Amino acid sequence: MRRGYLAASAFAVGAALIAAPLAGTATAANDPGAAKANSRWLATKLKPDGTLDNPSGGSLPDHGLMLDVLFAMHAAGEGARAEPIVKFLDDQGHATDYFTWDGLAPGAGYDKIVVGGAVAKTLVAAQVSGRNPRAFDGYDLVAETQGAIMRKGPDKGRISDYSKDPALADAVSNNANMFGQALGVIGLAAAGANDRLAIDKLLTQQCSEGYFRVLFAYIPTKETGDHVTPDGRKVSTCDEGKPLGLSPTDGDATGLALSALLAAKKAGAAGLDAPIAKTVSWLKANQTPGGGWGGGVGTEAPNTNSTGLIVQALADIGGADAAVDKGVRYLKSAQANAAADAGNKLAGELGAIAYDPASYEAARSSGIGGADTWIRASAQASLGLSQVGFYALAKGETLPPATDFPAPATQVHKPKAATPKPKKFVTPRASTGARVSTAAAITTPVDATPAARLGAYLANRLVGGDHVEVTEDGKTYVDYDATADVVLALRALDQQPDAVTRASQFLLKPESVQAYAHGAPYEQGEASYAEPLAKLVLVAEFAKSDAAGPLRADLVKLRGADGEFTDTGSFADADRTVERHAWAVLATAADPGPAVELLLSRQCADGTFPKHLDTAECGSGDLAATAAAVTALVARPHTDTAPPTRRSDAWTERRVSAFVSAVGALGVRPTGEGLVTGEGGETDVALSAAVAAARQTAGLDASGTARSLGKLVQADGGFAKTSGGETDFPTSSAAAQGIAGRSWLTAADSPLSPAIRLPLTTGTDTPVLAAAQADDQPAWVVWGLAGLALLLLLTAIALVFVLRRFTKKKGVTP
């Protein structure tokens, strides 16, 4: 990071370049996980439109640093995170604000003034992003970069700042430096247009020791010719500038120049072996014992910025493994990580890289003081962790992402042999126990409430602070379904709002929606899945996102005339569960159509609902399905009006009767502590929470379940599947509503609210339902009250029979 050079011109090109995590690297020394964490931290610093504030002030963002972020994210295989940046520059037409002066005074003709280094950097960015570099923001950036190379005069071969309009020529001072020169060589090499003038000019800036200086410098000369200015000066070589103090060593310029020479060589340029070898020798000789390298004037001490650029270049050429290994260790010694920073001031900044290890150590107790410094440091440093060469980036030959898109939800149709095996999306309770990656270290006081402890546990399971990952058969996947469940769980708990915001934004990204709800990249044609769409609708409505409307429209397209939602695509979910149908009913609560009637038609004789929607008749059903059905039946679009205790005009008698009997059935199974036990007599945490949430939504008290589950929280804030077992993430996620003592449907900002509240005042109460209103009533009390009610009814009937017989004997009409 060199603030002095950046301040020299409002248009100077920054040296910082950032990278992100990757998998399957070519060098054993790299660290994909560390680079990935850094990329995600950097992504949190971008504004929604992809910009970063310019620390120097002004109305324009820091375009150069934004491009550094873009480079790194693509190097990490996470180019989607950089999409807002390229959209801002290309689609919205702001690239010219960077490589011309038009952004300073629009419409004044300053679009004719070109900033050479900036246009070269934009060329590389267009290539890295997979955009057309010959039509980026309306410009042919290959031609523009070639046009910035002076073909004659004192700056011959130099990628320069210049004016296309001669009338404005005197307004331009050529501040182009070696960063722009190197990036121009890289961009033209990747375009198959090596320019020997630019390559040779870059070589003149290498001193005999092997390093490169950063600034072109004029010196007095008695020479004559086109290369001499009218006042007798010329651009010096690096060696010519040394006696005048104009050629200080510069680690950043040397690392980037090495990358440029490698790119030119790979594109066919000859005669570069010797200067490349000299550069590598100098870099090896000047690595500090701690593994780092320094920059230039003002940044001579070892730092992560310079080290990241140099490690990236040395890894690209190969043969310097020892130096690369030491450099990576140095970089990681300045990076916030979960193992070392749980509970300190960096716990919420995992992946960030400080300017040097001392700054990192200081921040562990004081926190990040200047975000801009950390962003710039993280940018360049991350390149040393991912180790993807610039030429490879510009050619689109980046390493694959460390996390694959998972396949769509539950499926029956098997993919063809050539298709990657799809991953099954599962609900929290049905998970197979795949590893969930941790990302943050949020801590809570020992006396914190169970809800707060569980909230911290769930937020800590979000990789990079915004999604859940699982690893199966040695392969890592994004688990979008589990991520959605975490969002709704934290909503119910009313905990960790920042984590909720980040995870919601992650789920609503176009690429996430395509993967989760439409099966990308596994589906070969159009596909849509009802349950993922339903959950995304609810996540979007909680977040008050405009995405809710289009998502709901896609969901409604799947609803048939009979009310059933049918997936489309090769991996369509043919497992017709009541819970899946309930999600779709909730997401279309404003207009459920025949979906509610279909649900009502499947109720069992005892008031419960079956596990599967294709069960036509049943005597007794499934408790989890019943809880889901109760929640779906009672939901309405949110209103501040309290739910009535009388039947709504919109509710049929059939719906009221089904709802009341289903809630009554839920009140039978819990023990006196409000918990539900499984077949083995063990407490079923997930089922207890689901039942409690449904009952609370119906207007009944669920505090008994909340108190009882609160006693089962593990030391880490999560829950075990069985008593004495290890913490299980899916069980913990499912437990949230029980610990909260409420459903997410009744949580703050919920898009839904209950349409009715028990007990009703319309004569639909029963002794069983009345008894079921208290979670603390043991099952035998519930059944005892029911039996008592039945006994009283039989006694009354018998009494009437006796009286009738007695009165007949007396000749009295009853």
Image: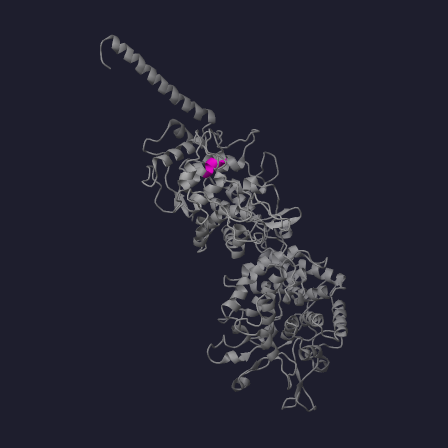
Residue 41's x, y, as percent? 58, 58
Taking depth in this image into account, of 263 and 605 the one nearest to the observer is 605
* Numbered range of the magenta stretch: 624-628
* The C terminus lies in quadrant: top left
Residue 807's x, y, as percent? 25, 11
Taking depth in this image into account, of 548 and 372 the one nearest to the observer is 548
Residue 210 against residue 151 in the figure, above or below: above
User: So how many labels did they put on this image?
Assistant: 0
Q: Answer with left or right where residue 152 lies relative to residue 652.
A: right
Q: Is residue 370 visible?
A: no
Farthest left residue in view:
812
The way the protein has been coloured in the rendering is one colour
Residue 810's x, y, as percent? 23, 8
* The N terminus lies in quadrant: bottom right
Taking depth in this image into account, of 370 and 520 the one nearest to the observer is 520
Residue 397 against residue 592 in the figure, above or below: below
Residue 175 part of the magenta-drawn span: no
- In which image quadrant can residue 759 be found? top left
Q: What secondary structure is the stretch in magenta mostly built from?
A: helix
Q: Is residue 624 visible?
A: yes
Residue 525's x, y, as percent? 54, 53
Q: Answer with left or right where residue 595 lies relative to residue 814.
A: right
